[in-house]
Amino acid sequence: MTTHQEEPQLQSRSPSLLPFKYSDRVLLKTLLDSHDGGRGFVGQRVVVGGWVKTSKEVKKLLPPQPTATPASVRPREEKFLDREKKGDKDVSCVEIIQSRIPLIRSILEVFGGGGYGRVHSTPSRKRIEPAPSKPATPPPPPPQLSTAYLLITDGSCVASLQVVVESSVAHPSNLLPTGTCILVEGQIETPSTEGKHVIELRADKVLHIGTVDVDKYPLSKKRVPLEMLRDYPQFRPRTTTVATVMRVRNALSFATHSFFNVQGFLDVQVPIMTTTDCEGFGKLFHVAGLELKADKQKLSTIHETDGVSLDIVKAAAKEKSNIVDTLKRTESNREALAAAVQDLRKTNELVSQLEAIEKKNLRALSSKDEAVDTSRDLFLTVSGRLHLESYACALGNVYSFGPRFQADKTDSAKQASEMWMVEVEMAFSQLRDAMNCASDFFKHLIEYVLGTCHEDMKFIAKRIDNSCFTRLQQIASGSPEMLSYNEVIDILRKVEDKKFETNFESGVVLTAEHLSYLVDTIYKKPVMIYDYPKEAKPFYCRLNDNGRTVAAFDLVVPKVGTIISGSQNEERINIINSRINELVLPREKYEWYLDLHRNGTVKNSGFTLRFDLMVLFITGLTNVRDVIPFPRSYGKANN
């Protein structure tokens, strides 16, 4: 009987809030992403931490204070009247006369006794009027009470929690500035007034306050342009947009590893620095040894081919100056303008320092004792597919996920100097196998984000791309259009309502303009293009029987462009040799790769997914620098 009576009580209890395993605080996601918005947690005590997004202070009106006069200082006649009203029978005659003195005094003044109370000097009598009493010092006003309403975020979800702090708990001036970090303890309550907040936290303890320098802090209650945020990567993730993008990026990273783990791939880390140029063409970063003899001491340094120069820093200063001018014209918030001005001043100071350093270096390089040794140059990896192929020939199916580098001076919205890639290699597979795997992987990433990042995608639909759900769902449920390179050329040649800047010629790489028109205007969905001219692809792509094209493919998506590139790799040693000679590549740099194909070669294929562009495609943003935590572009890396 007892068991049956207790069951309804157990079922009616609200769910308990478990703190983060490695901290006492409760993540806001646990509170706010529940199915009821957190109503089930009302009444529970929690510790939460976060950063103030917006705030306001509400002053409390003090009740009027009574001004009762103490009985000890009341006039004698008032005391008597009180006793008389109460029926006090012990009132003496003297007290009666004293209580009537004001009346007697008034009668005397009427009948000529108006001098009563002033000093009268007579030979026999002197009357002195009592000195007026000093006014009493008013008591100090009570302290002004107020309530601070704070919206805080801890980065775990889109939603913010309203925290209510009374001035008796903490002084509002320390809590209100945007960016202030707080750790508070209190009780979850239902808001006293109707609004968009389902719950709020009424704090009774403030455990930590991390103040901010309001004059220098670049963020404010108003939106700061994404372009300006790039100059403050240390604060970017505190904004809702960047935090949302990073959570989507995290989901895509997890989905990458889960997909290949389920399919039986092994994760292999390839080197960042290598002696081999995988792509065989293009501008590349490289690390070089520079040995200078000065006072019999060898100095070594690392430099970059076509690296950061004074001209680039000057260009950056000019760009920052344009940002300042734009903020002034658009009447943006003063905090953003002040931050931009300060950043411009620092950049100009850097220009002056670099000018001095450049003059000093020129003097040092003019020394006759200097010597440069380039025999030990190392490239920063453009692609890891060649190294990955050696492991595919031993382990079967492998993939790698990491940063790759390209020394591109262009300020393209789709290209940065450092970008993350997912690279795949499969043994005993051909071109069609790689294309199928790439298509499945691409759709898996979309499906995973739609299934696990619903609140983040709702914010993206509201703030960035209102068609993101429809766009992604259609792609996930369909398949890309399959076209050969020659078919694409024929389709674009027949276009009459568009004039392209580049004419079509066999062997010429399709430009971004061509690809954009193909997927955005003609097909309005992803297109997979295969069998490219051999001039358009790296030397290791397998040569087709016609001798003109190679077994390579690209997956092109709307608004972004090429997001996946892949190929079947050449397994015939004689063809690899001829391609290296044809492209005049340094043979000694590829000797290890040639040796791989002399001993136990196998047909294999693979592809590369540009991970940062995938994040760009999912979120609907337009510049890849806004989806990279710390973007590295030519001449732009300030931390």
Image (cartoon, rainbow, N blue to C red):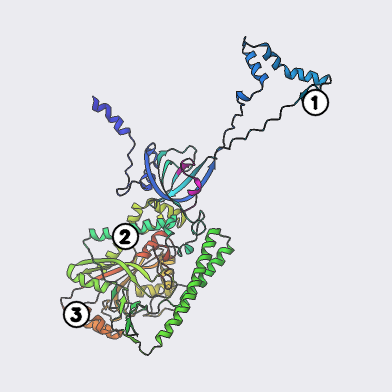
Residue 615, magenta (yes or no): no
Distance, label 3 to label 2, CA atoms, is: 34 Å
The residue where tag 2 is placed is 253
Distance, label 2 to label 1, CA atoms, is: 104 Å
Q: Please give left or right for residue 323 compared with residue 185 in the image.
A: right
Between 605 and 196, the one nearer to me in the picture: 196
**Image position, residue 12 (x, y; %):** 33, 33
Residue stretch in magenta: 163-179
Between 280 and 294, the one nearer to me in the picture: 294
Check disc 2: other Cα within 10 Å, few if <14, some if 14-19, many if 20+: some
Q: Nearer the viewer, mark 3 or mark 1?
A: 1
Location of residue 540 with respect to 324 vertically, above or below: below
Circle 3 — which element?
Answer: helix
**Image position, residue 608 (x, y; %):** 31, 68
Circle 2 — which element?
Answer: helix
| Residue furthest out toward the bottom | 368
User: Which quadrant is home to the C terminus?
Assistant: bottom left
Residue that appears at 37% across and 56% down: 247
| Residue furthest out toward the left | 600
Residue that appears at 52% across and 68% down: 345
| Residue furthest out toward the front | 123
For marks 2 and 1 on the same chain, the one whose residue lies earlier in the sequence: 1
Q: Nearer the viewer, mark 2 or mark 1?
A: 1
Between 119 and 123, the one nearer to me in the picture: 123
The residue where tag 1 is placed is 120
Distance, label 3 to label 1, CA atoms, is: 133 Å
**Image position, residue 224 (x, y; %):** 50, 59
Q: Quadrant of residue 72?
A: top right
Q: Please give left or right for residue 531 compared with residue 229 in the image.
A: left
Amino acid, disc 3: Asp
Q: Which mark is residue 595?
A: 3
